[in-house]
Amino acid sequence: MTQDVWFAWPSREALTHEGLSRVRRGIAWTVRAVLLGALLWTAVNERGPHGWSWVAGVAIVAATVALARGFWHQTLAHRLWPSLALLASLMTVAVVAQQTGWHILAVIVWCGTAVSALERLPLGAAVPCTLVALGAYAAVNTDSWMTTAISTVGLGLAGYVLRLDAEARGNAQRLLAQERAARAAESESAALAERARIAREIHDVLAHSLSAQLVHLEAARLMIEREPAGEFRDRILERVVAARSMARDGLAETRQALSALRGEMTPVEDYLRTLVEGGGPVGPAGVEVSGERRPIAAEASQAVRRVAQEALTNVRKHAPGATVAMRLEYLPDEVALEVRDFGGGVADELAVSGSGYGLLGMRERAELLGGTLEAGPDEEGFVVRLRVPA
């Protein structure tokens, strides 16, 4: 445990300003601005503003700032040896400043190095670096030994207090993140449980009802087929077979919806291929998929499935026997679907009956997801285009 304390890095949350209030963040930036201003003022005025001496002082300040930024980034990445190399470079800059007459500048760099090392490095490396920096500061300080000792101890304590405060803030950030993750997992679990309940209700009511309809329609078909052939009998048989097909498709769609509620949806492209292979009054149909395939959000997946289903339903109603070309494209931030039909016959009166609000509902679904849906005739038939974020 002691070994871990001496060689463990401060957490990344502790080494950043995450979790600081706006006031404390403003104070931190103000302290940095004041410190930089003090360095520049010292560089210009300690040896006088005349000649080239102040240029050298400004150059020392620039080198100090660049090395300090590098040290900040290296400690944030938990790289020990580059951090120590930059810290040694900062101490070298302080020695150069001291030897060339910028005594106050050197003192500021040594003190800042001592505090920063204790705040941002593992204690096993921070303590020796801080002792070296504070020892150099004590050696060049011209005040009384009592003042030097008090200021040296105060700087060490300040660095350690800053370290403890940063670690406390980092721990609070980690606990907050864990609590948010736990709440999100709890909400997701509750949502899944509710979806499972709804799926059971749909299965018990709608799926059973459709299954019973299929049984009765099949029985009706068999009974009608035993009757003598005739125009009326053939028309009734055709309608019963169509109703049975619709019930079967409805049952399949219900099972798809149940799978979606339980989070067990098949990939979109597989669903589209299965959809067009269903045939019916639609002629030859194909599905083209382009782009890098990836899992997409459940809402976007459902929108693509429902628009494809509605588009094929409209083809069956209004242009039976038409050739259908379906294209699914994975874009960087969205997914696009295009359903285009070519030619086709004329539907009978019963086939074209309906509310006419299918595509309107799909357009509203797309807009709720931040996408678009366009539908209308083109040169050879009808085209439906959907784009949704995914």
Image (cartoon, helix red, strand yellow):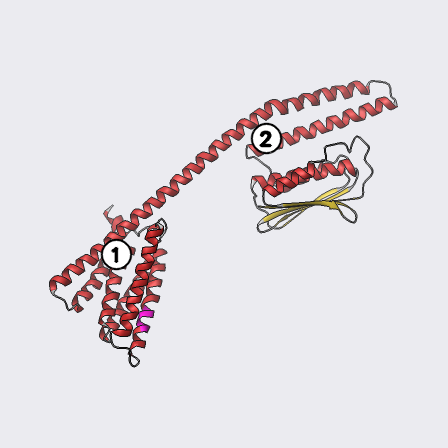
Would you call the spot at circle 2 few (<14 residues within 10 Å), some (14-19), or many (20 or more)? many
Residue at the image position 69 percent from the left and 30 percent from the top: 249
Q: Amino acid at mark 2?
A: Leu
Residue 377, horizontal then vertical, whole percent: 76, 46
Residue 53, horizontal then vertical, whole percent: 28, 78
CA distance separating discs 1 and 2: 59 Å
Q: Amino acid at mark 1?
A: Leu
Left-right relation of 97 to 78: left
Would you call the spot at circle 1 few (<14 residues within 10 Å), some (14-19), or many (20 or more)? many
Residue 71, horizontal then vertical, whole percent: 33, 61
Q: Report the residue marked by disc 1.
A: 118
Q: Secondary structure at mark 2?
A: helix
Above or below: residue 390 compared with residue 66 = above
Q: Hey, which residue is sitting farthest right in the picture?
A: 230
Write down the region rendered in magenta: 58-63
Q: Secondary structure at mark 1?
A: helix
Residue at the image position 23 percent from the left and 60 percent from the top: 130
> Residue 331 colored magenta?
no
Left-right relation of 63 to 217: left
Residue at the image position 79 percent from the left and 26 percent from the top: 239
Depth order, front residue of 189/125:
189
Q: Report the residue marked by disc 2.
A: 258
In contact (CB < 8 Å): disc 1 and disc 2: no
Depth order, front residue of 210/46:
46
Depth order, front residue of 187/241:
187
Whichever of labels 1 and 2 marks the residue nearer the N terminus, that label is: 1
Q: Hey, which residue is sitting farthest bottom in the picture?
A: 51
Secondary structure mainly formed by the magenta segment: helix
Q: Is residue 197 visible?
A: yes
Above or below: residue 6 compared with residue 252 = below
Q: Is residue 271 visible?
A: no
